[in-house]
């Protein structure tokens, strides 16, 4: 059989190699050993079975070795103290090696020496890594430098909500943004606008602004976090806009949180939260990739982390003051 415009090697690549597997969980066994539980991806049409997986680690680990094959796959390596690692897998069958999976959640195999983690001389890679290494640390200012940050910054880390690890950095007199595709003043710092994971995350945000930024909620929370719906031409993998391609759909029948409404997402496709009940917005005047308004739309945040509302009137601006984060806590 021949496919018009497709070479035989492309046919073999498309229909024979396994699809990316799914990493279910990653757990520490000891300082040098990590266990990775996984599931096969979508079966390929010819259904050739997966025979093994290839493990990749970020940052790179010296002497990374598969100690135990199968599922879970167990790997050993020279993991460094106070360093969080992420893993990807590639499935293998008789026709070759498939594409890599999504990254796992970060794990800290070696947490010894955490007493000065977050100091200027020993910055943590995120508030989440700090909470993993030192879960009894108090909320406060810590030095943070992730792999995408050119320089360490002193960021506020909340340690009171959901096990701790939400980190925050304030931007004042910054570059305003109205769309998820816009750059902003956090971009050159290696940080992004906050991905609001849960009501507890919003509560941590409230506590941070109240304690560290003088309660200036209306200045720093013009938008309801970096939750947007990209245009259909952007290739939304699931869901369909209630109003069709024009993005004039009404989402008032959906609960605005991950897993409960189509199309909306945060940039890392992780969990996000705005409400636990339906609301009168977004009601139909949404712009593709545009931010939902919070204080900019006349709504507010309560001390328990709940929001009084939000609006999709086109695309709301962050204004020149906003909060950015590593967004590392999944």
Image: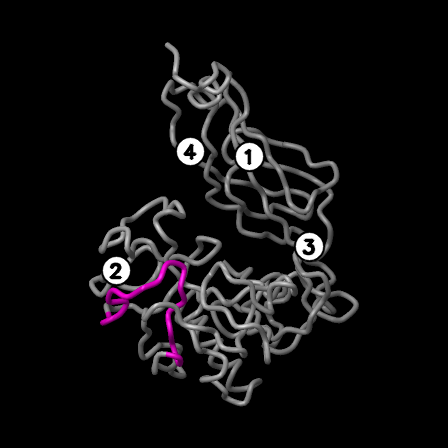
- Residue 4 place in picture, x, y as percent: 39, 17
The residue carrying mark 1 is 73
The residue carrying mark 2 is 248
Which of the two discs, 4 and 3, sits closer to the camera?
4
Number of numbered callouts drawn: 4
The residue carrying mark 3 is 83
Pick the residue in front: 299 or 319.
Answer: 319
Pick the residue in front: 138 or 293.
Answer: 293
The residue carrying mark 4 is 41
**Residue at the location (38% across, 32% down)?**
42
Secondary structure beneath disc 4? loop
Mark 3 or mark 2: name the one nearer the start of the chain: 3
Q: Quadrant of residue 242?
A: bottom left
Query: Is residue 292 located in the magenta-colored stretch of the structure?
Result: yes
- Residue 9 place in picture, x, y as percent: 51, 16
Query: Is residue 217 located in the magenta-colored stretch of the structure?
Result: no
Mark 1 or mark 3: name the one nearer the start of the chain: 1
Secondary structure beneath disc 2? loop
On-image quarter of the N terminus:
top left
**Residue at the location (70% across, 64% down)?**
114
Mark 2 or mark 4: name the one nearer the start of the chain: 4
């Amino acid at each position: 059989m021949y496919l018009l415009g497709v070479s035989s090697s492309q046919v073999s690549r498309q229909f024979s190699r396994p699809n990316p597997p799914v990493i279910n969980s990653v757990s520490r066994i000891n300082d040098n050993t990590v266990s990775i539980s996984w599931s096969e991806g979508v079966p390929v049409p010819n259904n050739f079975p997966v025979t093994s997986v290839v493990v990749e680690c970020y940052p790179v680990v010296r002497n990374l070795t598969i100690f135990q094959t199968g599922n879970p796959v167990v790997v050993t390596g020279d993991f460094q103290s106070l360093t969080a690692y992420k893993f990807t897998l590639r499935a293998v069958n008789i026709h070759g090696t498939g594409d890599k999976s999504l990254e796992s959640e970060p794990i800290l195999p070696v947490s010894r020496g955490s007493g000065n983690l977050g100091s200027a001389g020993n910055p943590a890679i995120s508030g989440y890594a700090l909470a993993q290494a030192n879960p009894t640390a108090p909320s406060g200012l810590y030095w943070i430098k992730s792999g995408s940050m050119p320089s360490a910054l002193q960021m506020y880390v909340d340690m009171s909500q959901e096990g701790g690890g939400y980190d925050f950095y304030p931007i004042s007199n910054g570059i305003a943004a109205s769309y998820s595709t816009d750059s902003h003043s956090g971009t050159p710092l290696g940080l992004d606008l906050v991905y609001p994971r849960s009501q507890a995350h919003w509560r941590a945000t409230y506590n941070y602004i109240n304690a560290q930024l003088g309660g200036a909620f209306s200045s720093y929370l013009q938008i309801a976090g970096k939750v947007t719906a990209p245009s259909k031409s952007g290739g939304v993998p699931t869901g369909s806009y209630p109003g069709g391609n024009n993005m004039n759909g009404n989402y008032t029948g959906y609960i605005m949180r991950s897993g409960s409404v189509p199309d909306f997402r945060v940039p890392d496709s992780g969990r996000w939260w705005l409400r636990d009940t339906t609301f009168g917005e977004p009601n139909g005047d949404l712009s593709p990739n545009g931010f939902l308004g919070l204080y900019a739309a006349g709504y507010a945040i309560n001390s328990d982390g709940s929001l009084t509302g939000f609006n999709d009137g086109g695309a709301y601006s962050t204004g020149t003051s906003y909060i950015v984060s590593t967004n590392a806590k999944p």
